Image (cartoon, rainbow, N blue to C red):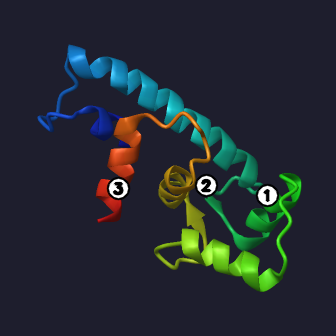
């Protein structure tokens, strides 16, 4: 749904021929993000808890100086303060930090719109 809304630049509820190419790019982009998210979501509950987040950092070989620093990063991504990182929050963060280098412009704009 996120890809569809971002591709519908005319905001008429339909994806026309001009917008269709963008939709395909966005579907690919969000699918890539979802694959990363699934790898982090060890217990498959469609959300990332702090322990899964910590393991993800360890698997990626990212050195974090302290648990407090890691908790701070987790809290930054967990914008609804639910104690879990949801896919929507993950996508917003991924766009900010350019987790995937090929972010379609529409995806970036959609992220910025949802943040405001």
For numbered disc 2, what is the local secondary structure?
A: loop
Cα distance in 3D space between marks 2 and 1:
15 Å
- Image side of residue 77 versus residue 19, left or right: right
Frontmost of labels 3 and 1 is 3
Q: Nearer the viewer, residue 61 or 7?
A: 61
Q: Residue at x 15, y 38 (%)?
A: 11
Residue at 43 percent of width and 31 percent of height: 26
Q: Residue at x 28, y 40 (%)?
A: 5
Which type of secondary structure does the marked residue at label 1 adopt? helix
Whichever of labels 3 and 1 marks the residue nearer the N terminus, that label is: 1
Q: Quadrant of the C terminus?
A: bottom left
Q: At which x and y percent is residue 2?
A: 37, 43
Q: What is the number of the mark on residue 56?
A: 1
Seen in the picture, residue 38 relative to 24 is either above or below; the reply is below
Q: Which mark is residue 112?
A: 3
Residue 46 — which label? 2
Q: CA distance from mark 3 to mark 2?
A: 23 Å
Q: Quadrant of residue 112?
A: bottom left
Q: Viewed as shown, does residue 110 lie left or right of 70?
A: left
Q: Earlier in the sequence, mark 3 or mark 2?
A: 2
Residue 64 appears left or right of 101: right
Q: Is residue 33 left or right of residue 25?
A: right
């Amino acid at each position: 749904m996120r890809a569809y809304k971002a591709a519908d630049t005319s905001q008429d509820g339909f994806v026309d021929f001009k917008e269709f190419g963008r939709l395909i790019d966005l579907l690919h982009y969000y699918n890539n993000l979802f694959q990363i998210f699934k790898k982090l979501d060890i217990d498959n509950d469609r959300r990332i808890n702090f322990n899964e987040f910590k393991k993800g950092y360890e698997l990626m070989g990212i050195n974090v100086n302290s648990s407090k620093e890691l908790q701070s990063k987790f809290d930054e991504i967990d914008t609804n303060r639910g104690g879990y990182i949801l896919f929507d929050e993950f996508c917003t963060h991924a766009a900010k930090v350019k987790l995937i280098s090929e972010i379609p412009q529409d995806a970036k704009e959609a992220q910025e719109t949802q943040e405001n």
